[in-house]
Image (cartoon, rainbow, N blue to C red):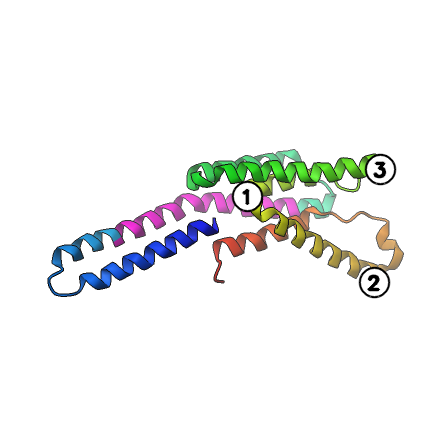
Amino acid sequence: MRARFQMVRIGWQRVSFLWKASGKPGNTSLSLSHKSIKVSTNLDEDLLMFVALPFLIFYASFSLLLGIYDARTGLLPDRFTCPLLWGGLLYHQICLPERLPDALWGAIAGYGGFALIYWGYRLRYQKEGLGYGDVKYLAALGAWHCWETLPLLVFLAAMLACGRFGVALLVRGKSALINPLPFGPWLAVAGFITGWKVFFPDG
């Protein structure tokens, strides 16, 4: 998605250059043509944002819901994670079709990566070290953020979770080791952070 913003930015710079050139004497027909290009570019951007906005609201709402639900119950239900995953793929199919393969591989990588951790830990220690809801949630995040963003997203979530655990350990001591720390809220926060950097790269 970052590449798409770069393409829009480069295209806008070219249109601006042609617009300035059209203001020179003798460039009347060129001026009309480039004004049409500028209007068309603005309409395309407005239409894309109009179509994408409901998807982004859907993503933000479900991620916030999953983060809060996991923090309160320790669960990430399929009735929330599955629609989020399919919503991410549908978003790319409609708004960014050239990125759909990356979104699909993001879902596969998210699910496969966390599933390996889940089963590896369970076979080694005979207990769960990671909830299977986290596996499905990362698959959904992969469908939205695409595969290349997942390493940064997981790293941020892990750092946030470690920071939260460190604070709990300092405050409550060894009693903090009794209750497992939900990972879903930190995946949600990391998703918002990486998503912000994608949509607002200069922010």
Q: Residue 121: x percent and y percent?
A: 80, 39
Amino acid type, mark 3: Arg
Q: Main secondary structure of the magenta part?
A: helix
Q: Is residue 76 visible?
A: no
Numbered badge on residue 193: none
* Label ID, residue 124: 3
Q: Which residue is mark 2?
A: 170
Q: Residue furthest right?
A: 174
84 over 159 or under it: above or below = above
Amino acid beneath label 1: Cys
Q: Nearer the viewer, residue 157 or 171?
A: 157
User: Up-down: is 52 above or below 115?
Assistant: below
Of marks 2 and 1, which one's residue comes earlier in the chain?
Answer: 1
Please state if 107 lies on the left or on the right of 183 as rendered: left
Classify mark 2: residues with Cα within 10 Å, few (<14), some (14-19) or many (20+).
few
Viewer can see residue 191: yes
* Residue at 53 percent of width and 39 percent of height: 103
Q: Is residue 54 magenta?
A: yes
| Residues drawn in magenta | 38-67
Question: At 48% from the left edge and 38% from the top edge, which residue is drawn?
Answer: 100
Which is more toward the observer, 135 or 147?
147
Q: Secondary structure at mark 1?
A: loop
Residues packed near mark 3 inside 10 Å, few (<14), some (14 to 19) or many (20 plus):
few
Mark linked to residue 146 = 1
